Image (cartoon, rainbow, N blue to C red):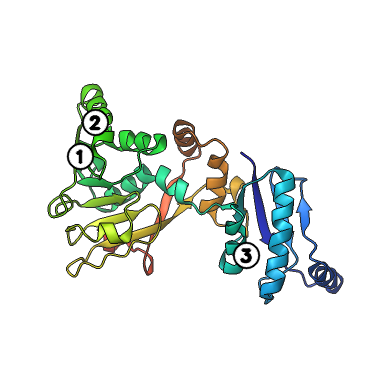
Amino acid sequence: MKVCYIREGKDTSDVIKKVLIIIKRFFNIIEIDKNKEKLMYYLPIFKTTKVSENKIKKFSEKIIQKLEKEGIQDIVLSKHLETINDLKLKLYSENINILDGRLLFKCLIYEALEYISKIKNKKIQELDITFTINEFNNINKDIIILIAKNVKTLNIITNHIQKLKRVQQYLHEEFGVMLNVLNNKKKSLLNSEIIINFDFPQELLNQYKIYDKAIILNILGKTPIHIKKFNGININYFKITMPKKYELREFNNEIIYESIIYENAKFANIRKRIIQDKIKIQKLIGNNGEIRENEIA
């Protein structure tokens, strides 16, 4: 699956090069670099340049035309372009998929649990883990099986209990793992040390009584907890360590690596690549930035 990378122009102190970029900006000219393994588009703007809404609209239209010509639906934006909401909204409105690291976060749940258990000085098997999940596609089922095979007991909170019966039976017969499928809003999350929230929206998750010191990993993004006694940790994102050969200076490591695994999105292949590249969680990110190790401990 082909992915396109889009970034601002390269900073330069060369007067002639700056004039050329200004001319390109005036005529909405987007540079294309096809010489590397990655298809890269350069917008004629700098980080320090304030660009009008009208100009962003014209750039967006040009990008969309070029993507259609190349038959590309999936893109990676540089750190700077990620901050330009008008650009993102225009691309989203044309069904362009902007990679955000969420697929990678989902596939790195095991590494996140390793990170947490190491800080807590526990084995993963000793953690009380609960998934909150309603969508049971193939990749989600594979993740449940991966985690379940490495713990003694796994709890699943869902509104679709019947969909998990076969997975429940498979885990018990093949690995002797107890998969508890529950949906009691007063009790199901009351003792859960680690809650991995796959897809419960804020409104639904806040209907449950939650252990006041729980660690919650929100796979889809920010899910604020409004329960008065909650004094736990709400994790919304992550930072990884990855081989330097993949790094691109103006892009987030997490999204670059997601673009690599996105090309072959079967879970078994993704996990094989993650293990091969020795991808590890470096930091977990909460509502107020990086979460310190002593907070987790």
Badge 3 crowding class, 10 Å Cα cut-off, few under 14, some 14 to 19, many 20 or more, is some
Percent across and percent down for residue 243 are 55, 45
Residue 152 located left or right of residue 270: left
* Residue for point 35% across, 35% down: 141
Instruction: Return the residue nearer the eye: 71 or 224.
Output: 71
Percent across and percent down for residue 112 are 35, 48
Give the Cα distance between marks 2 and 3.
44 Å
Look at the picture and state if 72 lies above or below 186.
above
Residue 176 located left or right of residue 33: left
Tell me the kind of residue under disc 1: Val
Percent across and percent down for residue 16 are 87, 71
- Circle 1 sits on which residue? 181
Give the Cα distance between marks 2 and 1.
9 Å
In which quadrant is the C terminus drawn? bottom left
Tell me the kind of residue under disc 2: Lys
Helix, strand or loop at label 2? It is helix
Whether residues under marks 2 and 1 lie with C-beta atoms below 8 angstroms apart, the answer is yes
Percent across and percent down for residue 81 are 62, 64
Look at the picture and state if 208 lies above or below 275.
below
Residue 10 appears anywhere in the view: no
Whether residues under marks 3 and 1 lie with C-beta atoms below 8 angstroms apart, the answer is no
* Residue for point 67% across, 77% down: 50
- Circle 2 sits on which residue? 165
- Circle 3 sits on which residue? 87
Helix, strand or loop at label 1? It is strand
Tell me the kind of residue under disc 3: Leu
Residue 101 located left or right of residue 6: left
